[in-house]
Image: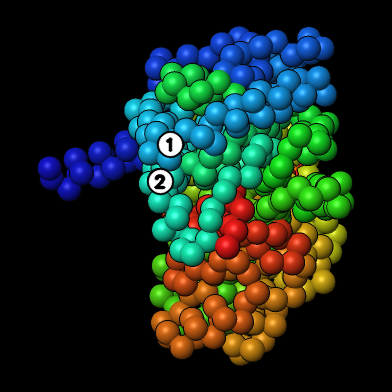
């Protein structure tokens, strides 16, 4: 090509019509029913009060399906089915249990495209993320815990591991299938049975998973899925037939649950909110760090409990980092979650969008300077442009409170000690990130930041072998790895 043709080709390619040439994932391969029932005792059954609620596609505001609303009598039935199944499941040989959990892992892999597409339709997350992160990681959790099923004695040498009974599991809407995997895989691998309640805005992949449970041949009642909102969750938590509660969600609801079960002897793990510090030293590889900041706060629209939502930049590089961040933010594409070009999908619900907007207003009222990208957003659906606030201070609400959206608060620090003090000035303690060229600083920061997980020169990395959980208002207990296995066992001896 001569330079003139080359120039023309370039202009054509970046003409508006071409720039965002859509590359949508097909929906031909998925099957969604108009209505979903409760999954109890291995069968889909209608809710006893006959009530249903809609599950909405947040990118189009259209209804995807009608979902059964479980009330107290349905919770009774689900817990009874789980209790009945526990009698058998806890006596199935460990090798057989492992085989069935492996089977679930493989079936998830085989149908990963379908699950990824439904996850993006129901929750609004970009297909690139559901395809490359949510679904493969969910399958990886089933593989990992399947492997432990017949090796529990080796996992905890000198102890006698025993399953707990019926686990009530309540999950949020930000990583629906992945949170299901975090909960169900270790529970059933250890010989427990479960009643799981997905979040009201994202029940579909859990209900599709129920189909896998049927197809895999798990004994009826080992896995039960009940759908509904907070009242359904509360009925499950308060049910006397439940032995263990595993909850992931907001700190407010975590507090309610902790109060409700105090003195009942029910075991519990609570994975709650976060407001992670992402700390950039002047000696860090700045371009890499900027990518890490983007990933830390804009991944999954910022609907991430461990999101790096408080950025601390060493003062000498603050202007450079903020400018690079703003430039990078400008290149992010917001839009159709099913489009493979999309970086930032839809906000999960209207309610969440309103919550994020209220924080944008609070930030401005607190005197912070707001910077947003100028990218176009679709007319319908729930959208929020990536946003950073500069000129904030420690006491600002946008610094202290979890926003759960693509909103970053930027502060500076001079010395390591100052960075550490500011990072720890939070009621939360779930995660953190540090970016530096110096190993010694990594050690000092990772030891000094009070948080369950701290990433060094990376962010948002997850693995089934690695425990995850928080300190302070971020929760109690760990999921993942051996810690996550122990949370579903009593370890006598
Ligand atoms: P978020 O603010 O992220 O929606 P929530 O803590 O409200 O987080 O929700 C997380 C999960 O907890 C959802 O499945 C929700 O339906 C459930 N839930 C809400 N309120 C209660 C409650 N009082 N008891 C038990 N579960 C609840």
- Asked if residue 281 lies left or right of residue 255, the reply is left
Q: Which mark is residue 93?
A: 1
Is the residue marked by circle 1 packed among few (<14), some (14-19), or many (20+) residues within 10 Å? few
In the picture, residue 131 is in which quadrant? top left
Position of the C terminus, as image quadrant, is bottom right
Give the x, y percent position of residue 479: 57, 54
SS class, disc 1? loop
Is the residue marked by circle 2 packed among few (<14), some (14-19), or many (20+) residues within 10 Å? some
Q: Which mark is residue 150?
A: 2
Q: Residue furthest front?
A: 493
Give the x, y percent position of residue 261: 83, 48
Residue nearest the viewer, comparing 168 with 457: 168
- Give the residue at x 48% y 25%: 218
Number of numbered tags placed on the structure image: 2
Position of the N terminus, as image quadrant, is top left
- Give the residue at x 71% y 24%: 80
Q: CA distance from mark 1 to mark 2?
A: 8 Å
- Answer above or below: position of 47 versus 183: above
Residue nearest the viewer, comparing 389 with 299: 299
């Amino acid at each position: 090509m001569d330079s003139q043709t080359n120039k023309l080709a370039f202009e054509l390619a970046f003409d508006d019509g071409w720039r965002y040439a859509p590359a949508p994932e097909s929906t031909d391969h998925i099957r969604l029913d108009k209505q979903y029932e409760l999954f109890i005792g291995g069968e889909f059954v209608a809710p006893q009060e006959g009530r249903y609620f809609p599950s909405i596609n947040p990118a189009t505001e259209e209804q995807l399906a009608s979902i059964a609303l479980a009330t107290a009598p349905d919770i009774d039935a689900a817990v009874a089915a789980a209790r009945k199944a526990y009698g058998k499941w806890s006596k199935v040989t460990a090798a057989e249990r492992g085989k069935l959990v492996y089977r679930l892992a493989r079936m998830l892999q085989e149908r990963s495209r379908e699950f990824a597409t439904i996850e993006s339709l129901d929750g609004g997350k970009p297909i690139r993320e559901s395809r490359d992160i949510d679904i493969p990681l969910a399958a990886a959790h089933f593989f990992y815990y399947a492997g432990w099923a017949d090796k529990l004695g080796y996992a905890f040498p000198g102890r006698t591991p025993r399953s707990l009974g019926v686990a009530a599991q309540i999950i949020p809407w930000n990583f629906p299938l992945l949170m299901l995997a975090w909960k169900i895989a270790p529970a059933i691998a250890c010989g427990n049975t479960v009643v799981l309640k997905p979040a009201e805005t994202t029940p579909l992949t859990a209900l599709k998973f129920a189909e896998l449970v049927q197809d895999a041949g798990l004994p009826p009642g080992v896995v039960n899925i009940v759908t509904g909102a907070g009242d359904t969750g509360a009925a499950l938590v308060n049910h006397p037939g439940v032995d263990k509660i595993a909850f992931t969600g907001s700190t407010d609801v975590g507090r309610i649950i902790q109060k409700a079960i105090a003195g009942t002897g029910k075991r519990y793990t609570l994975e709650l909110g976060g407001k992670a510090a992402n700390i950039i030293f002047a000696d860090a590889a700045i371009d890499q760090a900027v990518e890490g900041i983007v990933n830390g706060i804009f991944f999954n629209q910022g609907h991430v409990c461990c999101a790096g939502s408080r950025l601390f930049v060493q003062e000498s590089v603050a202007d450079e980092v903020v400018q690079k961040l703003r430039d990078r933010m400008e290149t992010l594409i917001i839009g159709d979650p099913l489009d493979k070009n999309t970086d930032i999908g839809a906000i999960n619900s209207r309610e969440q969008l309103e919550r994020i907007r209220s924080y944008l207003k609070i930030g401005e009222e607190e005197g912070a300077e707001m910077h947003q990208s100028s990218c176009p957003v679709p007319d319908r659906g729930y959208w929020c442009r990536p946003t950073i606030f500069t000129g904030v201070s420690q006491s600002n609400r946008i610094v202290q409170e979890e926003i759960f959206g693509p909103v970053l608060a930027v502060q500076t620090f001079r010395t390591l000690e100052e960075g550490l003090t500011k990072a720890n000035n939070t009621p939360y303690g779930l995660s953190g990130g540090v970016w530096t060229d110096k190993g010694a600083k990594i050690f000092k920061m990772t030891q000094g930041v009070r948080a369950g997980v701290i990433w060094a020169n990376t962010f948002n990395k997850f693995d089934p072998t690695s425990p995850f959980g928080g300190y302070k208002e971020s929760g109690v207990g760990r999921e993942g790895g051996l810690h996550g296995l122990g949370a579903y066992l009593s370890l006598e001896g």
